C-alpha cells in the first residue's frame, strides 16, 4: 500500500512517461494480463490508455487490473490509468518513506 508521499512521487514520474499500453473494447484476456505483468516487472510504473470503446467504467477496470496484477493504482486521470508494482529482485524506483 502506498502512502500519499509515495503516490505524489509516482505521479510526478508518470507525468514524464507516455501511455505505452491501450485497452480497447475487447475483454482483458490472459495475453493482455501477461504483457502488463511483464511490463510492471521491467518498468515498475506503467501508464495505460483506455479507449472510448471500452464499456466498463475506468474505476472498475483499474481495480480489476490492480487486483489481477497485484499492483497499486497510483492515479486515474480521464481515460488513463497509472499502475505501480515494486520489483523485489531489481528495484528501479526508490520510493520516499
Image (spheres, rainbow, N blue to C red):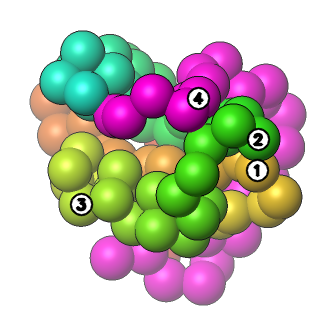
Sequence-earlier tag: 4 or 3? 4
Residue 14 visible to an observer of this rendering = no
Identify the magenta region.
1-28
Q: Position of residue 93 (x, y in %)?
A: 49, 40
Label of residue 52 in the image: 2
Please tell me which residue lies in front, 45 or 58: 58
Label of residue 24 in the image: 4
Residue mark closest to the camera, 1 vs 3: 1
State how far apart marks 4 and 3 are (Cα): 19 Å
Q: Position of residue 32 (x, y in %)?
A: 33, 22
Please tell me which residue lies in front, 42 or 68: 68
Identify the element where label 1 is drawn.
Answer: loop
Q: Are marks 4 and 3 in contact (CB under 8 Å)?
A: no
Q: Is residue 17 left or right of residue 60?
A: right
Q: Residue at x 24, y 45 (%)?
A: 69
State how far apart marks 1 and 2 are (Cα): 8 Å
Q: Are marks 3 and 2 in contact (CB under 8 Å)?
A: no
Mark 2: few/some/many CA within 10 Å (<14, 14-19, 20+): few
Identify the element where label 4 is drawn.
Answer: loop
Residue mark closest to the camera, 4 vs 1: 4
Amino acid at each position: 500500500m502506498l502512502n500519499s508521499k509515495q503516490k505524489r512521487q509516482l505521479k510526478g514520474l508518470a507525468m514524464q512517461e507516455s501511455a505505452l499500453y491501450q485497452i480497447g473494447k475487447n475483454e482483458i484476456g490472459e495475453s493482455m494480463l501477461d504483457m502488463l505483468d511483464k511490463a510492471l516487472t521491467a518498468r515498475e510504473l506503467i501508464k495505460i490508455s483506455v479507449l472510448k470503446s471500452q464499456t466498463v467504467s475506468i474505476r472498475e477496470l483499474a481495480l480489476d487490473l490492480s487486483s489481477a496484477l497485484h499492483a497499486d493504482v497510483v492515479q486515474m486521470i480521464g481515460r488513463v490509468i497509472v499502475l505501480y508494482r515494486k520489483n523485489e529482485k531489481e528495484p528501479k524506483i526508490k520510493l520516499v518513506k
